[in-house]
Amino acid sequence: MSSGSEVDRPDGAVDDDRSPTARLRRAELRVAHLEGQVEVLQAQIAALEAADEHRRTELADARDEVAEAKAAAREAKARAEERRHLIDELREQLTDARAAGSHEGDGRGTGRGWLARRTRS
């Protein structure tokens, strides 16, 4: 009978845990295990790189959308400013027209200059 650290082999030789053959076998198993871990890590890296590329693409798209939105906002602001100026001008013209209408008049001072001018025609 053999001790706990020895293994009976079919060829009758006793394999000791400290023998070069046993150490080589353990090293081979360790290398195979590490190679498996490397493959898993490489697959994880590839997946992370793909996800990273996808996020970079999404970020670039989002930046493009932001730039477009800012341009649209600037255009809308410019249009609003133009309309404000137009409204101010129209209000001023209306005020001037009302003032001119109240001075022109048909003697009644109705302040309806445009209507009075229209009915006189």
Image (cartoon, rainbow, N blue to C red):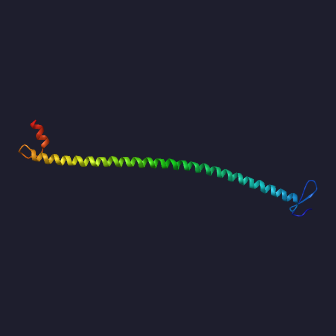
Q: Which quadrant would the N terminus be assigned to in this image?
A: bottom right
The residue lying furthest to the left in this view is 107
In the picture, measured across the screen, residue 56 lies left or right of residue 81, that is: right
Residue 13 coordinates in the image, percent (x, y): 93, 57
Say which quarter of the image contains residue 14: bottom right
Count of numbered badges drawn on the protein: 0
Above/below status of 120 relative to 98: above
Q: Give whichever of 17, 109 is nearer the camera.
A: 109
Residue 120 coordinates in the image, percent (x, y): 9, 37
Residue 76 coordinates in the image, percent (x, y): 36, 47
In the picture, measured across the screen, residue 57 lies left or right of residue 12, that is: left
Above/below status of 72 relative to 29: above
Above/below status of 119 relative to 49: above
Residue shown at 58% from the left, 51% from the top: 52
The residue lying furthest to the top in this view is 121
In the picture, measured across the screen, residue 110 lies left or right of residue 5, that is: left
Residue 74 coordinates in the image, percent (x, y): 38, 49
In the picture, measured across the screen, residue 43 lies left or right of residue 70, that is: right
Q: Which quadrant would the C terminus be assigned to in this image?
A: top left
Residue shown at 42% from the left, 49% from the top: 70
Above/below status of 6 relative to 103: below
Residue shown at 84% from the left, 57% from the top: 24
